[in-house]
Image: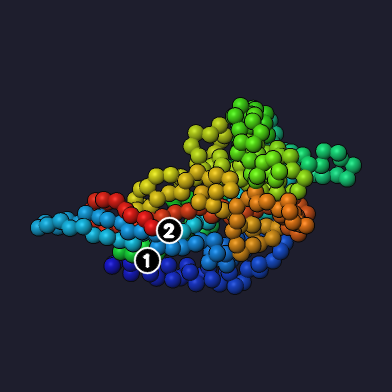
Amino acid sequence: MPNSRRLALPTLVITLAVSALASRAALAQTDTTTTAQILANTVSAAPSCASWRVSGTCFWLHCTFWSCSVKTSMRVSHYNPDAVVSTFHEDVAHPWTDWGVALSRSLRSTAAGLVGVPVDSAGTRTRDDRRDRSKMYRDADVIGHPTSLLSLLGSSGTFTMLCPTEVRAFQPYLSSYIDALVWRAMLPIESLYPAALVPGLREIGAWPLNSWSAVYPRDGNVTQQHPVKGAAVLSQRAGDITTRLGQPHVYVPLPTGGRHMVGNTMVWLPPPLVERDISTGKWQMLAPLAQRSCEVFGGNDSILPVSWGDGRTSSTGGYAFNLWRPYSCCSRAGQIFLGAVTF
């Protein structure tokens, strides 16, 4: 209980602060977004995207000096907004104006020293006289979500309502500038995967009738006539890389797979991201159009008069998405975790 009391006041203060930001930040349909708007849009989408539910019961062995008994605690499951994934033509057109622009500029200068050559913008812009208008290149980054600062305040030692995440707010987990050799296909390592060589493997969409593009090769080049779909494909690739260990890229993995204790909470971490599998993660557009719902990429829109992404095209070529990932957790109720049942 003392821990709960200490957490109650900071949690209330931060909740009020986030609510104030949500009311003040405009949910405007612009080409860019800010940290305040990201917080506001995430809060507004939480009822739809978090999908909070009671998902089971955890069992713990609780021992005193005299005896031992089995205690239980409620297991809950929901999605956390772990990362902001952005794609952009150049750093000045980064859709996250107050953090992404400054970070990408800083990382670009760092990358030049690592790669040994200047890492300038390599994005392609569509011109009316081009015949290869479906081919595009974009830079990308994966940045820890600002709400991760609040996650550890969502649980106490006695009753867990929100599962904590160990994602670090504002930390770059992937930057295509630092990963320039592979992301720009200067080292064609990604082309060696079977999914990059065999059509129909790891497609975003229903191949061959309605494929947005393939996940592999996971670099910044994509063939897609619709720029919003192209941004979605590149975001899926960035998420695919950062939710797996040992990939041939320069990146920091997001916490993925298995279970462990975070403070007084047993947490089941989300699995690696898989395209069109909502049980591994889902997406919420932040810029240029802020949405209040989540979805998976690759839906079949071939039978509709409009295409997915129509009305959401950015004039600067920059797009930003929240990546929501599924967590489960329960509070510690004893010294030894015995197991859990789910429903």
Residue ID for mark 2: 77
Please state the horizontal and vertical placement of residue 201, each as a whole percent of the image.
61, 36
Residue occupying image coordinates x 59% and y 29%: 193
- Colour approach in the figure: rainbow
Q: Extreme right residue here? A: 129
Foreground tag (1 vs 2): 2
Q: Residues within 10 Å of mark 1 (few under 14, many from 20)?
A: some
Is 200 placed above or below 268 here? Answer: above
The disc labelled 1 sits on which kind of residue? Leu
Residue ID for mark 1: 7
Please state the horizontal and vertical placement of residue 311, each as a whole percent of the image.
76, 59
Q: Quadrant of residue 106?
A: top right
The disc labelled 2 sits on which kind of residue? Ser
Q: Is residue 340 visible?
A: yes
Q: How many labels, in total?
A: 2
Figure quadrant of the C terminus:
bottom left
Residue occupying image coordinates x 43% and y 44%: 257
